[in-house]
Amino acid sequence: MEKKLTKKREAILRESFKLFLSKGYDAVSFPDIERAAQVTRGAIFHHFNNKEDLFKHVAEQFIFAFLEDVDYGEEYLSSPTPLKDFINRCLIVTEERMMHFLQGLDANITTASFMSFILYLKDHYETWGKTIEVYEEKTLKDWSNAINLAKERGELVPDADTILLAKTFLHLYLGLSFKGAMIDKLSISELRKQWGYIYEQQLIK
C-alpha cells in the first residue's frame, strides 16, 4: 500500500511539473492534475495541503535537486591538465542533464518553458534567492578548485585571477542558457567554443 501511495505521489509531482511548464502555474487547475496523473482529488490532498504546497514540492524535486545534484567526477583532480578535463566533464554533464530533462517530458515542453518556470519561482518561492546564492557559491567553488589546481600544475599562467575566471566560465554558461531558451535550447557546441576561447587565453604558452 505504501509503495502504491508513493507511486501516486510521484505521478502527481511529475505530471504537475509538466503542466506547470506547459501552461504556467496560474493556468493549471486541479482537474488538469487529476486527468494527467490519473488520480482523484482526495489523492492529491492526501499528499499536499493545497496547490501552493504542491508547487513547492515540485520545485524542490525537479528544480532544486537539478541545481544541487551535479557530479563532476574525480578524474580531473589527478590530471596534469585539471581545468581542461574539468571543462570537458562539465560539457558532458550539461549535455546529459539537458537531454535527460527534455526526453523525460512531453515534446511540447521546451527550455523556454523551463526558463519561464524559473522566473515564476523567482517571484513566488520565498527562499529562491538564497537557493540561487548557494548554487552559485558551490559552482564557483568547484570551478575555482579546478583553476587553482591548473595554476599549481603549470597548466595556466600563475597570475590568473581565479575568482574572475571562475565567474567568467559560469556566467558564459548562464548567458548561453538564457539565449538558448529564447531560440531552442542551449548550444553545447557554442558553449564549448566560448569556454575553449577563455581557456586558451590563460594557458602557459
Image (cartoon, rainbow, N blue to C red):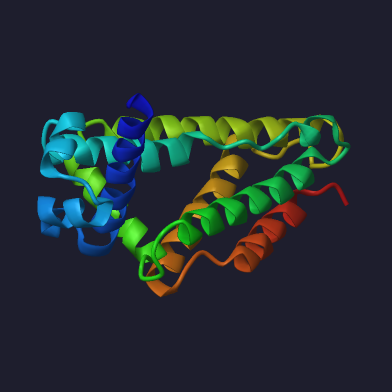
Q: Position of residue 49 (x, y in %)?
A: 12, 31
Q: Is residue 29 visible?
A: no
Which residue appears farthest toward the bottom when viewing the image?
Answer: 183
Q: Position of residue 53 (x, y in %)?
A: 17, 34
Instruction: Judge by depth and name the residue closer to the eye, 101 or 49.
Output: 49
Q: Position of residue 28 (x, y in %)?
A: 15, 56
Q: Position of residue 144 (x, y in %)?
A: 63, 33
Among the 4 quarters of the image, the one containing residue 192? bottom right
Instruction: Judge by depth and name the residue closer to the eye, 39 or 120.
Output: 39
For the point 46% across and 39% down, which residue is it? 67
For the point 55% across and 51% down, which residue is it? 97
20 relative to 42 in the view: left or right? right
Picture layout, residue 117 above or below residue 49:
below
For the point 88% across and 52% down, which residue is it? 205
Q: Is residue 186 visible?
A: yes
Which residue appears farthest toward the top when viewing the image?
Answer: 2
**Which quarter of the rendering shows the N terminus?**
top left
Picture layout, residue 31 above or below residue 150:
below
Tally of marks: 0
123 relative to 109 in the view: left or right? left
For the point 78% across and 30% down, which residue is it? 77
159 relative to 81 in the view: left or right? left
Picture layout, residue 156 above or below residue 173:
above
132 relative to 38 in the view: left or right? right
